[in-house]
Image (cartoon, coloured by chain):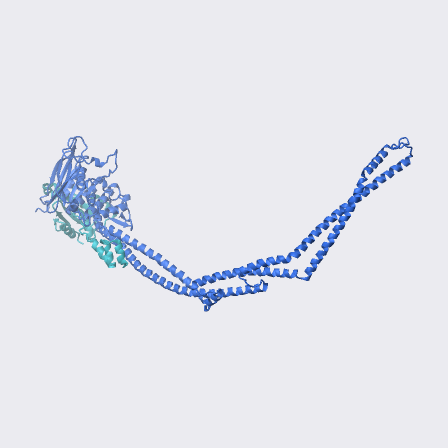
Chain colours: A cyan, B blue
Amino acid sequence: MNLAHEARSILEDAGYITAVPDQDSLMFYFEDNSLLGFIVIHERSETILDHWEEQQDSFLRHHAMRLRREPNKAWNVYSIHLTSDKPRTEVSGQLFQIEEDFRGTRKLVRAGIETKSDLLRALLPLLPIQNLIAVQPEDAYENLRERLATQNSSLAGILGDTQVHELVALLTEEE
Amino acid sequence: MRLSYLKMSGFRGVKDSIDLSLSPGFVVITGRNGTGKTTICDAIEYGLTGCIRSNVSRKEKGEAITDYLWWRGSGEPKDRYVTVGFVDEAGRAFGITRTPKGVSASDCESLEKLLCDQRVAPPECLKQLCRTTILRAEEITQLSLDLPETERFGFVLSALGTTDFSNAEEKAKDLVNKLKNMYADLERRYDLARQKINDVTGRLSEAKSQTSKYKSISGAEELIKKILDLESSDVPDLLETVRKAISGLRVQTNNLIHVQKDVASLDKRRREIESASFKEDLGKIENQMDELENQLREVDGEMEGLEKAIHEEERQTPRLASLAELYEQGRRLGLEDGRCPLCGSSVAETDYDKHLLQLEQSVKNASDVMTSLVESRSNAVKRKYELQTTLESVKRKYEDLSHSKEIIDREIEVLQKAAEESGFKDQPLVSDLLSDYVEDNRKRIQGLEKALASLEVSRAYEQMAELENEVKAAKKHRIEIEQRMMKVHHALRQGKDALALIRRVSGEMIDERLAELSPLMEELYFRLRPHVDWQEVKYCIRGDVRRFLSFEVGDGLNPSFFFSSGQRRAAGLAFLLAIHLSRTWCNLSTLILDDPVQHIDDFRALHLTEVLAAIRQSGRHVICTAEDPSLAELLCRRLRSEEGSEGCLVDMDYNSEVGVHLSSVRNIHPTVHKILMSA
């Protein structure tokens, strides 16, 4: 799975504009009306630890002038570091601590991304709710009525106005 | 449909009027403690339902929270009301105003119909709407992780608004119970029918056994009529007559047997009286009587002679007494100087003693004679008594023997009467005749008994036919009951299946709704990340009758018991937000959170902000209160103010004069420029 390609696709589906600043790097930008930021795809977990801060600062420096034009938006900058590499335990803890550093940008760091589902979960903070329930309530009464009627057509009367003594008579064929 | 404005006066901490336009995108409300952030939520709930729920349900000094719905501070507010406004997607506006007296004005016919899909809405849908729309700080864990499992299940169920089949279930239960009772009644009737068949079959078997013993009954009636000398009679009467006749004949026969014995005994005695030896014995007794009378006369003569002799001797008694006195005196005195003390004559001593001895002998002789006579008389008296006793005894024996015949005649007369009473008539009372008569009676009894048995067999045949018909009818009845039981059993099975189906469908619906809810809840939990290690949560349902809903993280761990309060609050928010977003019955798109970040750290507050942004991104209208101004600013930046769904930041304050009031309202304008892509 090409993480960069899939990540751009997901964000574009969510309404973001994306752009690749440098064809040779594994970084791309994204932006919508509220948010902006960059995503870097790393080959190894350790490189995230080595480069995240430098990449963040570089981004902020590079776009400082434009960010000043939109001070509210300037607060909503994300720097996202992704890798399919599975981190060692001690590295995993360190990666998590990067997210708790509130300086400069909001950081999202995710390692061990193997599937599109993993990638989607990694990018959730940027995406609208994914699992909204859109199913309209079916006519449960009709469903139950049909299922009762397959046993005995008289049984469907349980859902209607038929009185219980009438149901008894119908089921036992008592006149 | 979303909330569009809120107006109030004299409500809770608001003395003067507040008129708050609720921006279409989001509203962030900030302010210190006691500046009325929660009052905004209370006013919305009051406008929707006419009450506010509170965790302060108790009363103190007779007062409750309901006594504090309206302004209680100093001074009188100009007015007391709460107005909540709505606007739908088409731009149509509605509003409802409530005062302490109730609803005073409403633009809509029914708020319930406006806000809730009545087909699937839960009972008390507006209250349910408020519980799942206004997420209050103090309720976030109360309504989620801290809720008991069954109540949690009920909360989810009512919040999701599944179709209620409780009426159908009750009806099906009633149907099953009625069919069960009907079947139980049929089982009782079936048992009774079986019992009757067994009883009648037993009686039939008995009747058959009787009839097999007596094959012939011909002539039984004729025999009975002949024996009893009857004209004609129906069999039932004849049976009774014969039974009585046999009983009577048995009594008569027994009586005659006793009479016969007595007669035989009397006959023997009569023969003895008429015999020669009896007469000879009687003569001997007569002779004995004569002899005894002669002896008695002789004794009388002897006694008369003895009386005379005794009388003679008694005449000598004074003289003998004097002689005895003389002897005693002479012996005591003795000779006085050779002279007799009586006559004074001289007498020799030997002569004197000789005369005294003679005197003594004379007195002794007279005494011996007297004694002998008295003894003889005594013996004679004794003999006379013995003879008289013997004579009387012999006389009595003679009289008994001589009257025996008369006694026998009298006894015969009594027996004759007894024999006649027992049917022995017009015949001499002779033992042999009686014996013959008794024998005849026995034969009659035997004849009657055989005839009676024959007649009873005849009766048994008739009964047998009746019993066979009865058995047939009972078996037919049993088959009818059996067939009815099969029908009712079939109906009962169908009723039970229907009840199970209703429960199953109801359960399936719930499970389906929960299955729909599950990915949403898992997503929200993942977004809020309450715990660094357990980033996924699952719900777990168990129980058939009482159903339990619990949460699990990791390998079956229950977050309710080991998450910190902040983590529980974050997990609770995921749960409540999932429920809020799952209400397909609710037309109101506004989500209200009252200070949701209490006990939540900055990192998780950021997650919550991102979740609210995602909810906003999904088209929801969000109202959120936050005490922290910087968090309020963060919310305003992240909640996506866009063209057509802008947001606003409301700063609230309080002063003693006007109470709670709006300090400032700042619109959050959408971002115009792209930063990265502007080129």
Q: Is residue A136 above or below residue B27?
A: below
What residue sits 8% from the left and 46% below the top?
A: B678
Q: Is residue B398 left or right of residue B178?
A: right
| Residue toward you, A142 or B396 | B396
* Total marks in image: 0
What residue sits 12% from the left and 47% below the top?
A: B89
Q: Residue B83 placed where, x, y %?
A: 14, 39
Quadrant of the rendered image containing residue B203: bottom left
| Residue toward you, B463 or A170 | B463
Q: Residue B60 placed where, x, y %?
A: 25, 34
> Can I make out residue B495 in this image?
yes
Q: Is residue A167 above or below residue B600?
A: below
**Which residue reaches farthest left?**
B679
Q: Is residue B332 above or below residue B289?
A: above
| Residue toward you, B238 or A70 | B238
Q: Residue B215 placed where, x, y %?
A: 45, 68
> Can I make out residue B84 in this image?
no
Q: Residue B491 placed where, x, y %?
A: 29, 58
What residue sits 25% from the left and 47% below the top?
A: B154
Quadrant of the rendered image containing residue A155: bottom left
| Residue toward you, A18 or B342 | B342
Q: Is residue B162 left or right of residue B668?
A: right
